[in-house]
Amino acid sequence: MTIISLIKQVPLPNEMRMGDDGLMDRTKAKSIINIDCQFGLEAGLQLKKHYPDARMIVCSMGPGSFETALKTAISMGYDEAYLLSDRKLGGSDTFATGLAISTLLKHLGFTKDSKEPFVIFAGRQTSDGDTAHVPSQVAENLGIPQATFCESAKPDGKGNIVAKRIIEGGYQMMQLPIPCLVSLTPTGIPPRKPSLVGAIKARNMTVKVFGVDDIHLGTEKIGLSGSPTIVAAVANIESERPPIVLSEGSTESALAASLIANMKKGGNILQRKEVKEKAEKERPDFPVIDTRGDNRHILTWAEIANGQIARPSLELFTPARQLAEQLNETIPQGSEATSPFSGQGGNTKIKTVLIGKNVAPLAQTLFEHGADEVILVEDDRLEEYLVLPFADIIAQIVKEQKPEIALFAATTSGRELAPRIAVKTGSGVTADCTGLEIGEYINRKEKTIVRPILHSRRPTYGESKLATILGFVYPQISTARAGTFEVPQREEGRTGVVSKFKPEFVEADFRAEILETVRGGGGLQNLFEAEIIVSGGRGATSDGLKLVKELAEALKEKGLKAEWAVSRAVVDEGYAEYARQIGQTGKTVRPKVYVAIGISGAIQHLAGMKESGIVVAIDHNPKAAIFRNADFGIVGEYEDLIPELIECVKQGFTFGIETKN
C-alpha cells in the first residue's frame, strides 16, 4: 500500500497580497501548510495504522520555497517528498494544476491500473484559492473514484475505503474501491505536531524536485498561456454599511433597551462620497470576433435533495435568465464577426439536466422557474447522486448539445462535479461566483475583441478582492455561490420541452457506492428561507451555543421564520454541523435580520452574511471587526446580554420584523 498526500503551502491570511498581474504574490508572505491539507496529512497517517508497512509519500506543486512544507510533512511521519517546480507552471489555473499534479503522480508510477494499491489524500480546498477543484481534477485525470468534503476515511478490510462525506443538511457514508482519492475538511482528526525524530529525519531528507520536462508534461495546457481561464480584473471589496449605532447603558437590561430604541429610531445614513471615475482608456478599433463556433445556449444541472429540486439549483435560473437576455441583445460587429446571430441578436435557451430515478414530474418545477428545455436522464441506478456517473452523463450531454455556458450551484456536489466535467471537456471552471454577466475581452496581443464572453466574478484573497475570470474553452463553466442569487418568482403553468437522453453507461462509474445518507431537519433550506438568523461564533460557545439556540427558538415562538447558524470556527470545534456554517466556505444568506453573537468579523464570515438586511452585532471586544460591518451593536458578555434579549422577545421585541401571531 502507498499513501499519498497532496499539500500546498499558502500565505497566512493576513499576508495575502496581489501582484500587478492579478495573481498571488508569494515573494514576501509568511506561509504555512494549507489548513485543510494538514487534515489530509493526518488522515494519511491515520490510515497507516491499518497498513503499518505502507509507503508514505507527500507531493506538492509550486516554487522552491514549498520544500519547507514538504519537510514539515516528513517530520510528521511521511517517508518521501516530491515537488513539481518549474517557471513554466506559473499562473496555472486549477485545470492546469490538476493536470500537472496528476502527470507527476503518473510519472511516479501511480495510475488506475497500478498493481500496487494506493490512496490519495488532499485538503478540501486552499485558503488562497478556495475553489475545491483540484482534488476532483486530479482524480478525473487519473481515472479513479473520489470522495470530497470528507471528515474521515477508514479501510473496511475488503480493499475499500469508507469515507464520511459532508453534504448539505447532513452526511453520506461512501464506499470507495482502492485506488481512490479523498479530500478532507478541517473537521476531521486534528493534525499532529512534528516529532523530534521526524524533525531530524526531515533535516537530512532531500526533496526530489521535478520540472515539467522531467515528467514529460507538454506546455500547451499549463501555465498562464495554457490555462483555459485567466484573471481579467481584480477590484477591492469594501463595506457598504454606514457606521454602527452602539447601545448605551450601565446594565444588561439598559443595553437591551437601548438596542430596541436604536432599532426603532433607525440607524445611521451612509454618506457616499462623490468620486469622479477615471476616464476609460480609448477602446481600440480592433475587429470583433465571436469564438463560440457551434456552441450555443446555457446548460444548468438540477440537483435533487429529499425528492425535490434543491434551492441552489433553482437560484441558478436568475443569472441564467439574465445571461440569456444579454446574449440575445449582443450584436457582434466587425468584419471578422462569425456569429450566425451577427446583426440580429439571438435566441438563447436555458436547458437543464435532470438526472435520477422517476424524476420526470420535477421537470414542471424547472419550467416554472425558468427552464426552456429539460434534458431528462432516468435510471434506477441514478437514484442517488454519484460524481462518476453524473459527470460522465453530463459530459456526454455537453458533447451533443454544445452549450456555450454551463452553470452549477456551488454546493458540495456541484463543487466536485463541475471540475470533473471540466477535465472531460477540456474547459476551465470558475468557482463560487457571486456575479455573472456577458461582456467582451480585448486581446491587445492579437489585436482583436472577443465578444460575447462570460465574465464570472468571484471573491478571492480571503474575500478582500473581487476577481473577474474569463474562460476561452467552451462550454464556459462556472459554479454560483449558494444563497447569492434569489430564486426567481415561480410562473405557474409555464411549460417547456422535455428531451429524454439515453447515456452510454460505463460500469466502472458505479464502483463507488453510497452506504447511507443522513439529512437533518434544519440547516440549509431553513437558513435560506429564514427572516432572521441568530449566528454564534467562537465567543458564544462556553455554553455549547445554548443561548444562541434559545434566542432563535424564542423568535420562532413569536411566529417568525428564525434559524440559528454558526461561524466556521464553531464547526471546526465540533459544536455544529457544516450545514449551518455561514461564510466563504459555508453558506451565503440574506435574511432581513442577522444577529451575530461572539463573532469576530473575519472577512471570510462576512462574505456569507453581508447581503443581510440589518446586522446586529454582540461581542465583548469593542474593537472586533464585526462592529465595522454591522448596523447596530452591543458591547458586552453574551452570557449576560442574550437572556435579556430573550426576555425582550417574549415581551414582543422581534428586531423590527412583523410577526404573524
Image (spheres, helix red, strand yellow):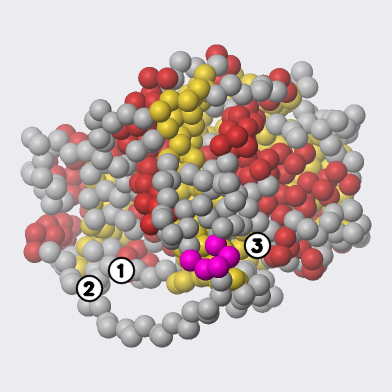
Residue type, mark 1 in image: Glu
Residue 424 belongs to the span the image colors magenta = no
Disc sitting over residue 240 in the figure? 1
Q: Residue 256 in the image: state x and y as whole percent.
A: 15, 56
Q: Is residue 271 left or right of residue 107?
A: left
Residue found at x 44% / y 20%: 359
Label 1 with label 2: CB-CB less than 8 Å: yes
Label 3 with label 2: CB-CB less than 8 Å: no
Residue under numbered circle 3 = 10
Badge 1 element: loop
The stretch of residues the image draws in magenta is 333-337
326 shown above or below 576: below
Badge 2 element: loop
- CA separation, marks 3 and 2? 36 Å
598 shown above or below 117: below
Badge 3 element: strand
